[in-house]
Image: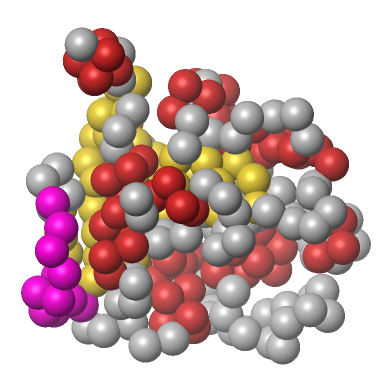
Amino acid sequence: HIYQRFVLSKIQLPQVTLIAISSVEIQQTVNSLKYSMRGIDFGEVVFVTHDYALDEIKADLSGITIHHVNRINSKDQFSRYCVYELPRFVNTDYMILSAWDSAIVHPEQWTDEFLEYDWVGPLWTEEHGYRDKNGNQVRVGNGHSLRSKKLINLASKLDLPWEPFTNNGQHSPGYWEDAWICVKNRHIYEEHGCKFAPIEVAAKWGRELHNPPIKENEGITPFLFHGREDPYLSLINK
């Protein structure tokens, strides 16, 4: 009876696709998607992976649309998919990008306020040191995010060049899709009407576990999490 009441009260998000793209940690990625589906009915749930990937696991794939692509062999290839290929797999106005080490853990924390923005993602720390074209520090940009169809269409529409990027001193130059969008090309996305969530909204959206914790996340129950060291991860793989 408790389970039945939970199912009947699921949040309805027909305008949102939940999507994961991966050629690694296949079982865990499916587990993450299924866990995130517990309290929400999405417009669609999509897993983009390589041929035969699912032959290696035993998983309940009900409710998940599978798209097969060539094996994704690197973070660079993954990031390119996220920048240019997502529109192929998203038929709704918004999408949430998930992964094997992230999931929606508190669906009751959903608010339609998130839909007022074209990008909502967990906070980066101040120490990440990302700065936009004008020298302003960027805190909102983590890739485990809500994105609008307008935003994911823009890179291909404008034929934005695929160039390596980092400006925070923590990574060697590479293709980090979240920083590529939210830092390197942020001004272009904003010029075309894309709105990035403010810090206070991003803090409610999700968390990345850091030591010490990000101060804006303290005392907030997150909608989702991302992080291999986060205690929430143990819930997914029970």
Depth check, front residue: 136 or 20: 20
Depth check, front residue: 89 or 222: 222
Depth check, front residue: 165 or 153: 165
Residue sitting at x 26%, y 84%: 71
Q: Where is residue 89 in the image (x, y as percent from the top left)?
A: 25, 57
Q: Is residue 77 left or right of residue 178?
A: left
Q: In this view, does 57 lie to the left or right of 162?
A: left
User: Which quadrant would residue 130 be assigned to in this image?
Assistant: bottom right
Residue sitting at x 48%, y 30%: 106
Q: Is residue 55 visible?
A: yes
Depth check, front residue: 164 or 13: 13
Q: Which residue lies furthest to the front in this view?
A: 238
Q: Where is residue 224 in the image (x, y as percent from the top left)?
A: 52, 41
Q: Position of residue 159 (x, y in %)?
A: 47, 72
Residue 51 shown in magenta: yes
Residue sitting at x 28%, y 69%: 26
Query: Vertical placement of 235 versus 221: above or below?
Result: below
Quadrant containing the N terminus is: top left
Query: Vertical placement of 156 versus 80: above or below?
Result: above
Q: Is residue 90 visible?
A: no
Q: Give the range drawn in magenta.
A: 50-60
Q: In this view, does 197 lie to the left or right of 10?
A: right
User: Which quadrant would residue 120 be assigned to in this image?
Assistant: top right
Query: Vertical placement of 212 versus 5: above or below?
Result: below
